Image (spheres, grey):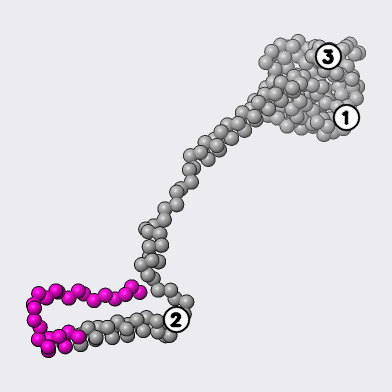
Amino acid sequence: MAPIRGRHRPTSHRKSRNAVGAVHSRVVIASMAAGAVAAGAQAISPDRPSGVEIATTQHLAQEPAGIQIVPALNTSDSAVHVEELARATAFAQERAQREAMLRRPQFVFPTSGIQTSAFGTRWGTLHAGLDIANSIGTPIYAAADGEVIAAGPTAGYGMWVKIRSADGTVTLYGHIDSATVEVGDRVLAGDLVATMGNRGNSTGPHLHFEVHLNGLTKTDPTSWLRARGVRTG
Protein backbone atom coordinates (compact mmCIF):
# COMPACT_ATOMS: atom_id res chain seq x y z
CA MET A 1 0.00 0.00 0.00
CA ALA A 2 1.43 3.36 -1.00
CA PRO A 3 2.44 5.63 1.86
CA ILE A 4 -0.40 7.82 3.00
CA ARG A 5 0.51 11.41 2.53
CA GLY A 6 -1.28 14.27 4.23
CA ARG A 7 -2.37 17.34 2.35
CA HIS A 8 0.16 20.15 2.31
CA ARG A 9 -0.65 22.83 4.72
CA PRO A 10 -0.87 26.33 3.27
CA THR A 11 2.29 28.38 3.77
CA SER A 12 1.89 31.18 6.27
CA HIS A 13 3.64 34.51 5.71
CA ARG A 14 2.85 35.75 9.16
CA LYS A 15 6.02 36.66 10.94
CA SER A 16 4.63 35.92 14.36
CA ARG A 17 2.67 33.08 15.85
CA ASN A 18 1.38 32.88 19.31
CA ALA A 19 2.54 30.06 21.52
CA VAL A 20 -0.87 28.49 21.71
CA GLY A 21 -1.09 28.16 17.90
CA ALA A 22 2.34 26.56 17.70
CA VAL A 23 1.53 24.05 20.38
CA HIS A 24 -1.77 23.22 18.72
CA SER A 25 -0.01 22.61 15.41
CA ARG A 26 2.48 20.26 17.03
CA VAL A 27 -0.35 18.28 18.60
CA VAL A 28 -2.11 17.93 15.25
CA ILE A 29 1.08 16.75 13.54
CA ALA A 30 1.77 14.27 16.30
CA SER A 31 -1.76 12.92 16.02
CA MET A 32 -1.45 12.47 12.25
CA ALA A 33 1.87 10.70 12.64
CA ALA A 34 0.40 8.39 15.23
CA GLY A 35 -2.48 7.62 12.88
CA ALA A 36 -0.08 6.79 10.08
CA VAL A 37 1.87 4.43 12.32
CA ALA A 38 -1.33 2.73 13.43
CA ALA A 39 -2.46 2.34 9.83
CA GLY A 40 0.89 0.84 8.89
CA ALA A 41 0.70 -1.55 11.79
CA GLN A 42 -2.76 -2.63 10.70
CA ALA A 43 -1.47 -3.17 7.15
CA ILE A 44 1.08 -5.70 8.41
CA SER A 45 -1.17 -7.11 11.09
CA PRO A 46 -0.88 -10.88 11.68
CA ASP A 47 -4.62 -11.07 11.08
CA ARG A 48 -3.97 -10.56 7.37
CA PRO A 49 -3.82 -13.93 5.54
CA SER A 50 -0.27 -14.98 4.70
CA GLY A 51 0.81 -15.15 1.09
CA VAL A 52 -1.41 -12.23 0.02
CA GLU A 53 0.70 -9.73 -1.84
CA ILE A 54 -0.29 -6.10 -1.58
CA ALA A 55 -0.23 -4.24 -4.85
CA THR A 56 2.24 -1.43 -5.20
CA THR A 57 2.84 1.06 -7.93
CA GLN A 58 5.78 -1.07 -9.01
CA HIS A 59 3.58 -4.15 -9.40
CA LEU A 60 0.94 -2.19 -11.24
CA ALA A 61 3.55 -0.87 -13.62
CA GLN A 62 4.66 -4.41 -14.38
CA GLU A 63 1.15 -5.65 -15.22
CA PRO A 64 0.18 -5.50 -18.90
CA ALA A 65 -2.03 -2.54 -19.59
CA GLY A 66 -5.46 -3.15 -21.10
CA ILE A 67 -6.81 -6.30 -22.79
CA GLN A 68 -4.26 -8.52 -24.47
CA ILE A 69 -5.24 -8.97 -28.14
CA VAL A 70 -4.09 -12.25 -29.65
CA PRO A 71 -3.78 -11.95 -33.43
CA ALA A 72 -6.22 -14.22 -35.26
CA LEU A 73 -4.88 -16.99 -37.46
CA ASN A 74 -4.80 -16.14 -41.13
CA THR A 75 -7.40 -18.55 -42.53
CA SER A 76 -7.19 -17.25 -46.09
CA ASP A 77 -3.95 -19.14 -46.79
CA SER A 78 -5.43 -22.33 -45.33
CA ALA A 79 -8.56 -22.00 -47.49
CA VAL A 80 -6.45 -21.51 -50.62
CA HIS A 81 -4.39 -24.58 -49.74
CA VAL A 82 -7.53 -26.71 -49.28
CA GLU A 83 -8.96 -25.49 -52.59
CA GLU A 84 -5.72 -26.24 -54.45
CA LEU A 85 -5.58 -29.70 -52.89
CA ALA A 86 -9.18 -30.41 -53.94
CA ARG A 87 -8.41 -29.31 -57.51
CA ALA A 88 -5.32 -31.49 -57.67
CA THR A 89 -7.25 -34.49 -56.35
CA ALA A 90 -10.07 -34.00 -58.86
CA PHE A 91 -7.56 -33.63 -61.71
CA ALA A 92 -5.74 -36.82 -60.66
CA GLN A 93 -9.02 -38.75 -60.49
CA GLU A 94 -10.12 -37.48 -63.90
CA ARG A 95 -6.76 -38.36 -65.41
CA ALA A 96 -6.89 -41.85 -63.88
CA GLN A 97 -10.37 -42.36 -65.33
CA ARG A 98 -9.22 -41.26 -68.80
CA GLU A 99 -6.23 -43.57 -68.67
CA ALA A 100 -8.42 -46.44 -67.48
CA MET A 101 -10.80 -45.82 -70.39
CA LEU A 102 -7.89 -45.87 -72.83
CA ARG A 103 -6.58 -49.13 -71.38
CA ARG A 104 -9.89 -50.96 -71.21
CA PRO A 105 -10.79 -53.39 -74.01
CA GLN A 106 -13.30 -52.25 -76.60
CA PHE A 107 -14.47 -55.81 -77.22
CA VAL A 108 -14.58 -58.91 -75.00
CA PHE A 109 -15.67 -62.52 -75.16
CA PRO A 110 -19.15 -62.53 -73.61
CA THR A 111 -18.79 -65.38 -71.10
CA SER A 112 -16.77 -68.39 -70.01
CA GLY A 113 -17.53 -72.00 -70.82
CA ILE A 114 -17.40 -74.63 -73.55
CA GLN A 115 -18.34 -73.71 -77.11
CA THR A 116 -20.92 -76.33 -78.07
CA SER A 117 -22.29 -75.00 -81.36
CA ALA A 118 -20.86 -72.57 -83.89
CA PHE A 119 -22.48 -70.23 -86.42
CA GLY A 120 -23.67 -72.02 -89.57
CA THR A 121 -26.28 -74.18 -91.20
CA ARG A 122 -27.23 -77.48 -89.58
CA TRP A 123 -29.99 -79.84 -90.70
CA GLY A 124 -30.94 -77.25 -93.28
CA THR A 125 -31.47 -74.50 -90.75
CA LEU A 126 -29.17 -71.56 -90.01
CA HIS A 127 -27.85 -71.50 -86.50
CA ALA A 128 -27.23 -67.79 -86.37
CA GLY A 129 -25.15 -67.63 -83.22
CA LEU A 130 -22.46 -69.12 -81.01
CA ASP A 131 -23.49 -71.38 -78.12
CA ILE A 132 -21.35 -71.41 -74.97
CA ALA A 133 -22.33 -73.86 -72.22
CA ASN A 134 -21.74 -73.46 -68.50
CA SER A 135 -23.67 -73.61 -65.23
CA ILE A 136 -26.76 -71.51 -64.51
CA GLY A 137 -25.77 -68.15 -63.07
CA THR A 138 -22.46 -67.86 -64.93
CA PRO A 139 -21.80 -64.13 -65.59
CA ILE A 140 -22.46 -62.79 -69.09
CA TYR A 141 -20.73 -59.60 -70.21
CA ALA A 142 -21.37 -57.01 -72.89
CA ALA A 143 -19.20 -57.87 -75.90
CA ALA A 144 -19.05 -54.20 -76.94
CA ASP A 145 -20.04 -50.73 -75.79
CA GLY A 146 -23.62 -49.72 -76.45
CA GLU A 147 -27.16 -49.08 -75.28
CA VAL A 148 -29.51 -51.75 -74.00
CA ILE A 149 -32.48 -51.94 -76.39
CA ALA A 150 -34.13 -55.10 -74.98
CA ALA A 151 -34.00 -56.89 -71.63
CA GLY A 152 -36.55 -59.44 -70.47
CA PRO A 153 -38.79 -62.29 -71.63
CA THR A 154 -39.07 -63.17 -75.30
CA ALA A 155 -40.32 -66.07 -77.44
CA GLY A 156 -37.83 -68.77 -78.41
CA TYR A 157 -34.97 -67.52 -76.25
CA GLY A 158 -37.06 -67.43 -73.09
CA MET A 159 -35.25 -64.30 -71.91
CA TRP A 160 -32.70 -62.11 -73.61
CA VAL A 161 -30.66 -58.89 -73.65
CA LYS A 162 -29.90 -56.90 -76.80
CA ILE A 163 -27.32 -54.13 -77.05
CA ARG A 164 -26.89 -51.67 -79.93
CA SER A 165 -23.45 -50.13 -80.48
CA ALA A 166 -22.69 -46.70 -81.95
CA ASP A 167 -22.04 -48.17 -85.42
CA GLY A 168 -25.45 -49.87 -85.43
CA THR A 169 -24.18 -53.36 -84.61
CA VAL A 170 -26.51 -55.30 -82.30
CA THR A 171 -25.32 -58.09 -80.00
CA LEU A 172 -27.87 -60.59 -78.66
CA TYR A 173 -27.63 -62.70 -75.50
CA GLY A 174 -30.29 -65.44 -75.38
CA HIS A 175 -31.54 -68.17 -73.01
CA ILE A 176 -30.33 -66.10 -70.04
CA ASP A 177 -31.52 -66.76 -66.51
CA SER A 178 -31.69 -63.10 -65.49
CA ALA A 179 -30.91 -59.66 -66.88
CA THR A 180 -28.84 -57.25 -64.78
CA VAL A 181 -29.56 -54.25 -67.01
CA GLU A 182 -32.63 -52.39 -68.21
CA VAL A 183 -33.66 -50.85 -71.51
CA GLY A 184 -31.92 -47.51 -71.94
CA ASP A 185 -28.85 -48.41 -69.88
CA ARG A 186 -25.46 -47.50 -71.33
CA VAL A 187 -22.89 -50.26 -70.97
CA LEU A 188 -19.22 -50.73 -71.73
CA ALA A 189 -17.51 -53.83 -73.06
CA GLY A 190 -16.99 -56.15 -70.12
CA ASP A 191 -19.93 -54.86 -68.05
CA LEU A 192 -22.13 -57.52 -66.48
CA VAL A 193 -25.45 -57.64 -68.35
CA ALA A 194 -26.96 -61.06 -67.54
CA THR A 195 -26.49 -64.49 -66.03
CA MET A 196 -26.51 -67.75 -67.95
CA GLY A 197 -29.70 -69.78 -67.94
CA ASN A 198 -31.75 -72.50 -69.59
CA ARG A 199 -34.88 -70.66 -70.60
CA GLY A 200 -36.87 -70.97 -73.82
CA ASN A 201 -36.09 -73.56 -76.47
CA SER A 202 -32.92 -74.81 -74.82
CA THR A 203 -31.43 -78.26 -74.23
CA GLY A 204 -29.21 -77.18 -71.32
CA PRO A 205 -27.71 -74.13 -69.59
CA HIS A 206 -25.86 -72.05 -72.16
CA LEU A 207 -25.55 -68.62 -73.77
CA HIS A 208 -26.73 -68.16 -77.33
CA PHE A 209 -24.71 -65.18 -78.64
CA GLU A 210 -25.48 -63.42 -81.94
CA VAL A 211 -24.07 -60.42 -83.83
CA HIS A 212 -26.28 -58.44 -86.25
CA LEU A 213 -24.46 -55.98 -88.51
CA ASN A 214 -26.44 -52.75 -88.84
CA GLY A 215 -28.97 -54.40 -86.59
CA LEU A 216 -30.17 -56.64 -89.43
CA THR A 217 -27.54 -58.90 -91.02
CA LYS A 218 -26.61 -61.90 -88.88
CA THR A 219 -22.90 -62.65 -89.02
CA ASP A 220 -20.54 -65.20 -87.51
CA PRO A 221 -19.82 -64.05 -83.94
CA THR A 222 -16.49 -65.89 -83.82
CA SER A 223 -15.15 -64.15 -86.95
CA TRP A 224 -16.51 -60.81 -85.73
CA LEU A 225 -14.76 -61.14 -82.37
CA ARG A 226 -11.48 -62.32 -83.88
CA ALA A 227 -11.45 -59.38 -86.29
CA ARG A 228 -11.50 -57.13 -83.21
CA GLY A 229 -8.63 -58.85 -81.46
CA VAL A 230 -10.68 -61.05 -79.12
CA ARG A 231 -9.49 -64.61 -78.47
CA THR A 232 -12.37 -67.02 -78.92
CA GLY A 233 -10.90 -70.28 -77.72
Residue 197 vs 6, above or below: the answer is above
Question: Which is closer to the viewer, label 1 or label 3?
Answer: 3
According to the picture, the residue beneath numbered tag 2 turns out to be 49
Q: Is residue 113 magenta?
A: no
The amino acid type, in three-letter code, at marker 3 is Arg
Kind of residue at disc 1: Asn
Return the residue at label 1: 134
Q: Where is residue 33 in the image (x, y as percent from the top left)?
A: 27, 83
Q: Is 86 situated left or right of 210 in this image? A: left
N-terminal of the pair, mark 1 or mark 2, is: 2
Element under disc 3: helix
Q: Is the magenta stretch mostly helix, strand or loop?
A: loop
- Which label sits in the foreground, 1 or 2? 2
Above/below status of 151 relative to 14 = above
Q: Could you tell me which secondary element the residue under label 1 belongs to?
A: loop
| Residue at 84% across, 30% down | 198
Task: Place residue 96 in its image quadrant.
Answer: top right
Residue topped by disc 3: 226
Q: Residue at x 70, y 17 (%)?
A: 165
Residue at position x 53%, y 40% from top?
78
Segment colored magenta: 1-26
Say whether disc 3 or disc 2 marks the residue closer to the N-terminus.
2
**Is 25 in the magenta?**
yes
* For residue 168, side relative to residue 208 (left or right): left
Residue at disc 2, secondary structure: loop
Q: CA gap, disc 3 to disc 2?
A: 102 Å
Badge 2 amino acid: Pro
Closest to the camera, between mark 3 and mark 2, is 2
Can you see residue 191?
A: yes
